[in-house]
Structure formats: structure tokens, C-alpha cells
Amino acid sequence: MKKKLSLLGNLSINEFLRDYWQKKPLLIRQAIPEFTGLLNPKQLIELACDADAQARLVHHKRGKWYLHHGPFDAADFTSLGKAAWSILVQGVNHTLPQAADLLKRFSFIPHTRLDDLMVSFAPKGGGVGPHFDSYDVFLLQGSGHRRWQISAQHDRTLIADAPLRILQNFTPEHEWVLNPGDMLYLPPHWAHNGIAEDDCMTYSIGFRTPSYQELGEQFLVYLQDNLCIDGMYADPDLKAQDHPSEISTQMLGKVADAIKKVKWDKADIASFLGCYLSEPKPHIFFDPPEKPWTLKRFQQSIKSNGIALDLKSQMLCQGSEIFINGESIQVDLLIYPILRSLADSRQLQADNIPDDACKLLYQWYLDGYLVPVAD
């Protein structure tokens, strides 16, 4: 935690978290030296044409903004003419192993906060307009050059009727051109505008910041699925009412007493957070192996080569509880550290794995949550 990292501009993790995280921007020259990206524009466009991709095409023409959602066809890009445009693809780490490896560099931020890796391409002049985000983001420059303008402004008035949340009155306070390997960290709600200086690609490592309203609503849904209040309303001592349309104080009192039985503690909050934060996005599905191995062959393989989480899997831990893709499993304290190691590094070098852990890993393999590591 005290080691100086070029990724953080020769700050230690502790220094970065203390002085910058959720506080102020940080420009980092050559955060990843010699980094020019993981994809070329053609490959990104091919990914944007995939039926499972979360892709957006933004273009600006004659003073108006346009937004289109994928999947796209190659013809969608040849018809843009001289418009300033950008293609943005979310969740590239779910399909590209090198992207998942890139995210591992940012493991100094807990996995509970990680959203995904978005990759964007824009020809000269392209961008998505000045805007602000409600999450933390590291903007890593791949190929080409992008000019970033940022502002701490409080005026968040948006352009009316625009298909994106574009600021109407953007006043830059700082401006830099990022070269390949440079990176800009922005806390939530900092206004920013990125403009391509030439054909350029940017890698956005985003960290979610759910609102308390969102968490509260989803916790109530969790309680609905998990609580149990015994008994039924009864009123054997019912009295006649002058006004039958009125809710009686007797009924109010009885129902209030029943609802007071709804209680929760930190263990319930932990279970909710683990399930909610590991829940896959709606478009994500897992494919079981076409020709699954037997348990015996599976054990032999992982003891020789190890096991890894599928690129789409999210795994979290708390206490003796393991959460994977929205599911919760209570495990023995003896195997908890083994599974936590898998969750931490997303892969496991398996030497002496207890049988109980092997059986659980095997079930996750059958579900498509894990993949064996190749020889």
C-alpha cells in the first residue's frame, strides 16, 4: 500500500486514496508506459456489431446530437459522412481477457465498486459532448490523442431535448491533451469534455456509486423475498363503527405491531449487498460447458492447472458467506480463505483443495461461472 506506482503518478495507493479518491482529479502522464490499447478501431466496431454488445453510437451534426443503440451493422459507420462521431462499447472486460487483466491493475479499489471497462473510438473532432458522471472513472488513453477539458462547475443545466445528458453551459477550468499511456482520474460530478485530436481510442475504467435511494429500494425488494411474518390479521373483538369507511385505531394498532416484527441487522445488510452488487446486468447470461467434465476429471484439471472465474462472473465475500453472480452460499470457515483467494485474484492455483470446496467449484463450473485454466 506504500509502494509508489507509475499507474498513480508515482503516488502510493494510500496517498492516492487519501488525497484524490472522490476528492479531486489527477492527471497521470505515462500511467502505463507504451500502452497503445487492446483493440484497434476495426475490432471495436466488430464488437459493437455483436448481438450481445452494449454499444452506443453518438454523432453531432449541424448543432444537433444523435444517439443510437447497438447492435450495429458495418453500414451504420460508412453512412456517417463528415459528422463528428464516437462509438462506445461497455463491458469489454466480459469478452476480452486482456481487458480483464487491465482491470486487475485497479484492484486497489474494492471489487464491490467496480462497474466495467468501456472502450470508445472517435475520429478527429469526435466526442460525446461536455457532461458529468455520477461515478469515479479512470480515463486511460490508448492509440491517438484526446483533449480533455474539465470543470468543477456547479451549473448542471442540460441541453433540452438532447438524447444525452449534455451540459448547456460548460466552462473549462483545466485542459490537457492525453497521449497513449496517459490517464486522467475524475471523481463523481466533475464536468468533462473529451475531443479527439485524431483517430483515438480511450479506455474508461468506471466505478459504480449507487445512490442510497437505489440501495434502499433494492433492500426492500430483498426483504420482500426473504422475510416471514407469522400469523394472520384477526379481530374477534371487533366493535361496530359509526362510519364503516374509516380505518379503525384497533386495526392500525394491530398491523403496526405486526410490521414492527420486520427487523434486520448487519448480517442481513451484508447478504443483501453481496447478492445485489454481484448480480449480473440483465443482458448477461452464462453458458454451461457443452461437454462437461466429470467431477474426477475436473478435480484433476484444477489441481494441475487451476481454475478461473468466467470473464462475466462477479464474486464477493463477507464473513463466511460467498456471493457469486447474485447467489449467496454459506461456507465452512476452513474453505472460506480458499474461495476468497479466488474472488480476490479471479483465479486459483489449486493444490490441496478440500473435497467440499471442489464440489462447490464443480457446480459453478457446470453453471458456467468458472472455466478451467488451459494447459
Image (tube, grey):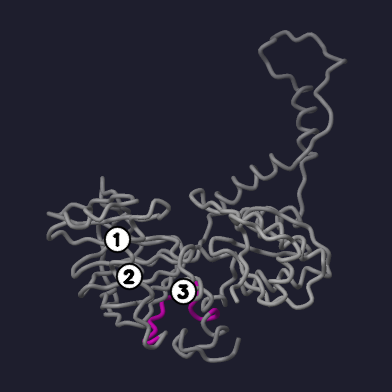
Span colored in magenta: 17-30
Amino acid type of the residue tagged 2 in the rendering? Ser
Image quadrant assignment for residue 330? bottom right
- Can you identify the residue that label 1 sits on? 87
The count of marks equals: 3
Q: Residue at x 77, y 61 (%)?
A: 359
Residue 151 image label: 2
Q: Residue at x 66, y 76 (%)?
A: 305
Residue 179's place in the image compared with 267, above or below, is: below
How far from the left and from the top, in percent, is residue 223? 70, 43
CA separation in Å, label 2 and label 1:
24 Å
Q: Verify whether residue 19 appears in magenta.
A: yes
Q: Residue at x 33, y 55 (%)?
A: 49
- Can you identify the residue that label 3 sits on? 98
Quarter of the picture holding the N terminus: bottom right
Which SS class for mark 3?
helix
Amino acid type of the residue tagged 3 in the rendering? Gln
How far from the left and from the top, in percent, is residue 3? 57, 91
Tell which tag, 1 or 3, sits nearer the viewer.
Answer: 3
Disc 1 crowd, CA 10 A, few/some/many (<14, 14-19, 20+): many
- Tell me if 233 is positioned left or right of 343 in this view: right
Return the residue nearer the eye: 315 or 268.
Answer: 315
Q: Verify whether residue 72 appears in magenta.
A: no
- Tell me if 87 is positioned left or right of 366 in this view: left
Which SS class for mark 2?
strand
Return the residue nearer the eye: 241 or 312.
Answer: 312
Tell which tag, 2 or 1, sits nearer the viewer.
Answer: 1
CA separation in Å, label 2 and label 3:
32 Å
CA separation in Å, label 1 and label 3:
20 Å
